[in-house]
């Protein structure tokens, strides 16, 4: 097993999945479990996960030839809010849930791509979501194609000096 920092550096967003290779049930379950156990503000768990695959799933969400997608919806009314300014944790919580899922996928030999570029109304209608749920993120999941590689900008990072301020 790779150490976490090396896994984080090696992981990249896959945009060219092998459409012929399905993801095993036990691996999909582990991804959903990784999302389920993700920490959320005040442990409110103000989200739902929808696994889409097969013909019906592809009608709802189909990106990058991925055989499966996990759609994350936020439930604003259930989310923790900061009392000082009303900041809602729902988007932050979903970012944590999504990160748990993509890191578990990487550890299982799968690739993923977090997606926010989709038509929310299409997801709402396709999943028949209740009014209180809003689709915020989807994660394409699958095995990489034979010509898979990171995007050219994958290794471009700002320096520590540009990103970190130390206050002593």
Image (cartoon, rainbow, N blue to C red):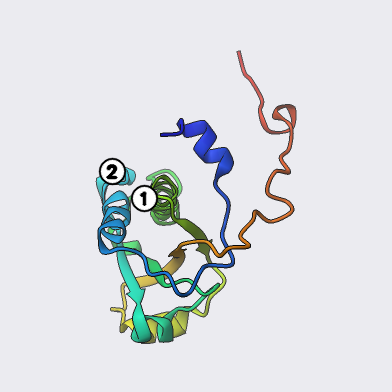
Find disc 1 in the rendering and name its residue. Answer: 81
**In the rendered image, is residue 67 in sight?**
yes
Q: Position of residue 41 (x, y in %)?
A: 33, 45
Quick one: 147 or 98, which is closer to the camera?
147
Q: Is residue 50 above or below residue 108?
A: below
Label 1 crowding class (10 Å Cα cut-off): few <14, some 14-19, many 20+? some
Count of marks, rendered view: 2
Nearer to us of marks 1 and 2 is 2
Which residue: 35% across, 63% down?
A: 76
The Cα atoms of the two marked residues, 1 and 2, are separated by 9 Å
Residue 38 picture location, percent across and down:
32, 46
Q: Which mark is residue 31?
A: none
* Residue at the spot 58% in from the left edge and 63% down from the top edge: 146
Residue 147 in which image quadrant = bottom right
Residue 46 appears left or right of 136: left
**In this rendering, position of residue 62 left or right of residue 15:** left
- Residue at 71%, 40% in the rendered image: 157
Quarter in which the N terminus is drawn: top left
- Residue 115 location in percent, x, y? 52, 65
Closer to the chain start, of discs 1 and 2, is 2
Say left or right for 110 vs 166. Answer: left
* Quarter of the figure that contains the C terminus: top right
Identify the secondary structure beneath mark 2. Answer: helix
- For mark 1, give the secondary structure: loop
The quadrant in which residue 159 appears is top right
Q: Nearer the viewer, residue 38 or 51?
A: 51
Q: Position of residue 56 (x, y in %)?
A: 34, 86
Q: Quadrant of residue 64?
A: bottom right
For the residue pair 155 and 76, the one nearer the viewer reads as 155
Q: Are marks 1 and 2 in contact (CB under 8 Å)?
A: no
Residue 19 position (above or below residue 6): below
Label 2 sits on residue: 42
């Amino acid at each position: 097993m790779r150490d976490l920092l090396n896994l984080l550096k090696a992981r990249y967003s896959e945009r060219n999945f092998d459409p012929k290779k399905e993801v095993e049930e036990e691996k999909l379950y582990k991804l959903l479990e990784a999302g389920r156990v993700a920490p959320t503000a005040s442990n409110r768990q103000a989200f739902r996960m929808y696994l889409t695959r097969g013909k019906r799933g592809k009608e709802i969400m189909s990106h990058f030839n991925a055989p499966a997608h996990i759609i994350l919806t936020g439930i604003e009314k259930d989310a923790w809010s900061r009392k000082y300014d009303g900041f809602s944790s729902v988007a932050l919580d979903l970012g944590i849930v999504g990160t748990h899922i993509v890191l578990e996928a990487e550890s299982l030999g799968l690739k993923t791509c977090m997606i926010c570029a989709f038509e929310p109304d299409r997801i709402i209608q396709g999943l028949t979501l209740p009014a209180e749920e809003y689709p915020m993120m989807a994660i394409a999941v699958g095995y990489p194609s034979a010509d898979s590689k990171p995007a050219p900008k994958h290794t471009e990072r700002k320096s520590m000096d540009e990103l970190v301020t130390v206050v002593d």
